[in-house]
Every structure is written in C-alpha cells, then in structure tokens.
Amino acid sequence: MKLGVIADDFTGASDIALTLAEAGMTVTQFIGVPEDKADAELDAGVVALKSRTAPVDEAVADSLAACEWLLAQGVKQIVLKVCSTFDSTPEGNIGPVLEALAKRTGAKHIVTSPAFPENGRSVYQGHLFVQDVLLNECGMQDHPLTPMRDPDLRRVLGAQTSWEIGHVPAQIVAQGAQHIRAALPPGPAMVIVDAIHDADLIEIGKAVKGEPLICGGSGIALGLPANFGAVPTTSKWKSFQGPGVILSGSCSRATRAQVSFYQRNNPAFEVSAEAVISGEITAQHLTEWVLNQVKVPLVFSSADPEEVRAAQHKFGSEMAAQAIETFFSELAALLSLRGVTRMIVAGGETSGAVVNGLNARALSIGPRIAPGVPVVRMVDKPLTLALKSGNFGTEDFFVTALSMMECTS
C-alpha cells in the first residue's frame, strides 16, 4: 500500500476514496481499523473512523491505531481527512489528532486545506468559503454538534493546538509547487494553504510529495495519486438490484432541501428525538412501514435548527443525538435482514450509525453520484450504499442516486 487515509467520519471516507479511485488508484474503504493485512495489490487504504465528534482522547487513540495499521501496510504518506467545512470544536478534534499523528510519523509541518472547489468550498486568505458566503453564514453556524461560527481557519485550528499556525496565501499557491514548498515553515507548524481552484490543489499535491502527514478534505487528494504513478482508468461496476430506502439524519440546509423535494412525490416518515426516546416510534415499527411501501420510502430526522435546539434543551444534546443514531443503526440492520439491498444515507453521523448497524467491515468504491459521493458496495453481502455528507448534492440527489443504483453496470 502506498497511501493511507484516516477519515474522521464515514461519508468523508467514501468521498476521498472516490477522488483517489477516479485518479487511478485501487482503493478500499475500511470500516474501523482492520484486524488483518490489506491486499498487497492495494494502492490506497481509507480507514473510516467515527472520531469527528468523539471525546478528544478517544479520537486520538482511534486515529493512532489507524495510523499504526496503515504504516504496517507500508504506506509512505498519511492523510487525515476532515470535512470540507472543517467541522470541529474549540477542543478538537483536528488539532489534537494532528499533533499525535505528527509525533508518530515525524512530521514537522502539516499542510492543511479543506478546499473542495467542485462542491463550492474554497480557502482564501485563510478563510473558508462555502459557495459565495463565509463558513459562518452558510448554515454551519447552526450545526447541532459542531457549529462553525468562525470562518478563519487559522483561528479555528489555533484554538485546538499549541503548535504554530502558518498560512500560505493564494498569491504564492498560484506560483506553483516549488513556491508552496519554499513557503512552509521548518516546524512544528500546521499550515493553512489557500486553494480556490482544482489547479491549486494539484500544485499543493505536488508540493507535499514525500511529506509523511497532510490534512484536508477530499480535494487535497486530487494531486496525490500522480506522486505515486497512478493513471486515471475506467472500471466496470455492477450494482445489486432490490428494494431500497433513504435514511436521513442530517439537519443541513442541503439535506433539508433534498428531503422536501423527495417527499413531494414519495412516501416519507419523519422521526423526532422525542418520539424515539419515549418509545412512540421504534425501529421495528418503521421496518414494517418501509417494507409496505410501493415506492422507495424516506425515513428522516432532518429538522430545522429551532426544532433541534428544542430537543437538545429538553433531553440534552448527547442523548438526543445518540437516540437518533441508535434508531437509524437498528433500522438499517433490520431492513438489511429483511432484504433491502439499496440504502441512501444522508449525514456523516447517520452514515456512521448505519454502517455500524450493518456490521460492515470494508466497502468497494463505485462510480460517482455527485461530487464527493460515490456508490459503494459492501464486500461481504449484497448491499449497495450511498453515504452522503449532509452538505453535498443538489435537491434531486435522492432521485439521482436511486436511478444510478438501479442501472449501474
């Protein structure tokens, strides 16, 4: 294995795996740290963790375990894959995890850029933009677990680490890889690197050739495969046919628009934290409802920010979130046992819960549905998935994904 990725959630893992696969690398997405060795022919391994919102100590321990396994497979470079909206809190987990990984890999400076221009994420003068607005104006300021209220990534990361925070501005990035490399401090430093276009990320990729550790969104991977001799190829893919379901736990603006669009013409069932905690709604109950639908149904808990805050105030944010995640985990497991073979899942935390409920261990990466979202397939059972970050996709995403799952070959 040449390149190793540690992803802090499951949708992010499939996102960067797609980027690497489209650039010609053979890639497998592993769910958690594998117990066995990887296939010797594998170019890249993506270890998907559920560490983004975990306690700091747990996130660090899990990330180090993933790092140890990847190094044992012979990887030459580690990527910490974070969300393209840099989801985190003042305590972490990006800074603490990077410090621990740097100590293990010997990294002195760590290039960091969550930019993903194809999905409207750009970094300019150290500030993160989502489309044409700053991060704190795009809806992420209302995220129930990781509200992002400061668009300056230097301040965001600086609050999480004792390391120096550097910055390589767009003017230097535009001059190419050599200038980027020359601008990096000797360390120890975490360096926010501006990126506005894909071409910037390609140059950043060239600049970090040979670096033991880097950090970013899936866009950071655009320039990495060429460093390892990869050449873009097309591969055949065959999806499984069968019953489908859409499970949505994201409260992002994009997902709420997708839920609204889909439920106009399709069966949909809204689940609240209060109904789950009280026992009014159970996974067993919803399983029967899903299986009785003629059209592919949607089960969602994608409330607007005010409803989410009300539930958090009543039950506590941790209990409310855990109740919904456990519900979706149990529902996915029951539906799989009853023959559902296509699942679309919206939201990073929800995707993690679903994949854990399915007891998935590894996923094969298929073609893209939308930027950052591939079709994936469990390697040990006939089940096809689409794991979508809450912020990704146009409003007809669910319809598009179902269509691709039906006809992909």
Image (spheres, rainbow, N blue to C red):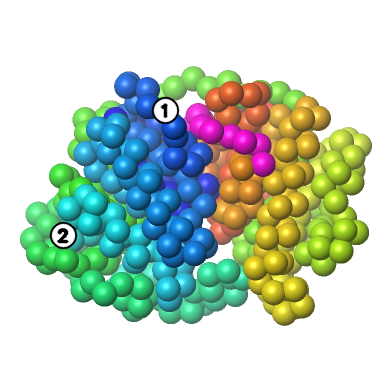
Q: Quadrant of the C terminus?
A: top right
Q: Is residue 214 visible?
A: yes
Residue at 61% x, 42% y: name it: 356
**Nearer the observer, 35 or 305:** 35
Specify few, some or many for label 2: CA neighbours under 10 Å numbering under 14, 14-19, or 20 or more. Answer: some
Disc 1 marks a residue whose amino acid type is Asp
Name the residue nearer the viewer: 90 or 244: 90
- The secondary structure type at the circle numbered 2 is loop
Q: What percent of the width, then of the height, locates residue 300?
A: 76, 55
Residue 187's spot in the image, x, y percent?
14, 65
- Front label number (2 vs 1): 1
Is residue 400 visible in this depiction of the protein? no
Name the N-terminal-most of marks 2 and 1: 1
- Considering only vertical position in the picture, is 29 above or below 159? above
Amino acid under label 2?
A: Lys
Q: Which residues are magenta?
A: 357-366
Distance in Å between CA atoms under marks 2 and 1: 30 Å
- Seen in the image, is 317 located left or right of residue 197? right
Q: Which residue is mark 1?
A: 36
**Mark count:** 2
Q: Residue at x 28, y 34 (%)?
A: 72
Disc 2 target residue: 108
For image coordinates 40% across by 31% down, the residue present is 27
Say few, some or many: other residues with alpha carbon within 10 Å of mark 1 (under 14 / 14 to 19 / 20 or more).
few
**Left-right relation of 391 to 201:** right
